[in-house]
Amino acid sequence: MKRFVTALLVLCLAISFLPAAAHAEFDPDKVSTPHIVLMDADTGAILYQKNARDQAYPASTTKIMTAIVALENADLDDQVAVGNSVETKGSCMEIKPGEKFSLRDLMYGMMLKSGNDAARAIAEYVSGSQDSFVALMNEKAQSLGMTGTHFVKPNGLHKDDHYTTAYDMAILTQYAMKNPTFREIVKTGSYQVKPTNKHSAGFLLENTNKLIYTAQDKESFEYRYATGVKTGDTPQAGRCLVAAATKNGINLILVLFGDLEGKIDGDYRFENAAKFFDWGFANYATVTPAELGLPSTLEKSITNASFEDDQNGQLIVNIDFSDKKVCGLSDFINELKANAAAITTSETLDRALVAPIEAGDVLGTIAYQYDGQTLFTANMVASRSVAEITVSTSDNPSPSPFLIGSPGDGGKAGSPWVFWLIVIIALLLILVVLRVLTLKKKARRRAARRRRTAYRVYRR
């Protein structure tokens, strides 16, 4: 009996150390969230997607863009005096007209507390008005390739023409998480704002992202690998979450949009986020171009290469595979390895393939595709220099074919006596030719007269 109890305890202990997937295999297709993207943050590879490019409302996840635009156009140590008009709708810090903050405090108020009033104050400080700031937001979205996005407000309060896609928001978050200040803000659990001219106690800001922070009196959904980023909630957008996590050097971004309020519990997104991340980390795989057997060079012909080129204008172009890898779920990577011969390429030249070319010049890019999906893009780099063909071997040709440089002047100037010698010879030749032509003409005339005289004698 003691042996049985001991074995049972050992078994229970062993089970407790098994990953969650061992208890119940996670199936992402069974998640009811309408719009989903799971992205590898380093390469942009999509590990899982569902209605990823369909239009969706972002709610307060909009503030990811607001934060980046502010960080790139202002200093966090700037002092901000809030205007007379303060946003009061939705989630707010409850700041007051005329209240003074550092831009840093407002940024934390926007990203942790999800303060709509903080977002408006930031926008008006950076650009003078919400409309001007929104123009910067849309300009940034366009530069990042967010083709399915249009912003109207800096805080994400609902407007029918304020929309994005789960894929676009993943692209934005991939960009934003490269900013160290942004990363520091969105991974913060709580933040204390010092007393202001309107609030003697200051503000205690707690992160609405429960993967990062859960108040002590509430059920915890904190995820040990979470690194950010932002929640969003409106009746039209539903429950939204953009999250990031890092484990063993793998950086993942997850976007969950559209779980309708009243139908789905508010914490459903946090539960699913942890499951998605665990599933992504467990099934993540990579393969290098070398492992796929992709050639690292191309051969190109340079038609205007110098006659002295010892390789007759043939140029080896190196493909820069440094830091290149293909990321994805293990099933996809295994499939790719087995079908590497099906990988296709397309080249984009930045310049015409004509000399002169210097060793190390980037000539363009080459994209590698499989089954309609771009795996990665690499630079094409010239392996050597190629000189162009030249018409004259002289570095400083004479300005006139009649002016020939002398050894004494280094070929930089013609010799006048040579020029006049050539002119005199040319004139003599012309005179000789004219003399010959004149004599021939006179001879023809004499012959004609003799013929006429002989004819008259004959007629007599």
Image (tube, helix red, strand yellow):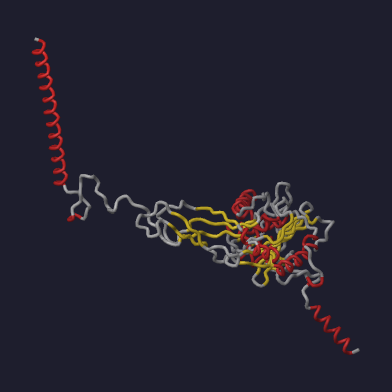
Q: Nearer the viewer, residue 9 or 257?
A: 9
Pinpoint residue 53: horizontal percent, then vertical percent.
70, 52
Q: Residue at x 22, y 52 (%)?
A: 412
Quick one: quadrant of the C terminus? top left
Numbered circles on residues, count:
0
Residue that appears at 79% across and 72% down: 22
- Image quadrant assignment for residue 347: bottom right
Front residue of 221 and 418: 418
Query: 277 above or below 418?
Result: below
Seen as rendered, the residue at the extreme top is 460
Extreme residue toward the right, this view: 1
Q: Position of residue 377 (x, y in %)?
A: 57, 59
Residue 335, position as x, y percentages in the image: 68, 63
> Is residue 114 something one can see in this rendering?
no
Q: Residue furthest bottom?
A: 2
In this view of the protein, which residue sits in the foreground, 111 or 6? Answer: 6
Give 451 or 434, whichever is nearer the viewer.
Answer: 451
Is residue 174 rendered to the left or right of residue 414?
A: right
Q: Is residue 296 left or right of residue 264?
A: left
Occupied quadrant, residue 255: bottom right
Indicate the quadrant containing the N terminus: top left, top right, bottom left or bottom right.
bottom right
In this rendering, position of residue 38 left or right of residue 310:
right
The reply to whether residue 443 is visible in this rendering is yes
**Residue 396 at x, y = what percent?**
27, 52
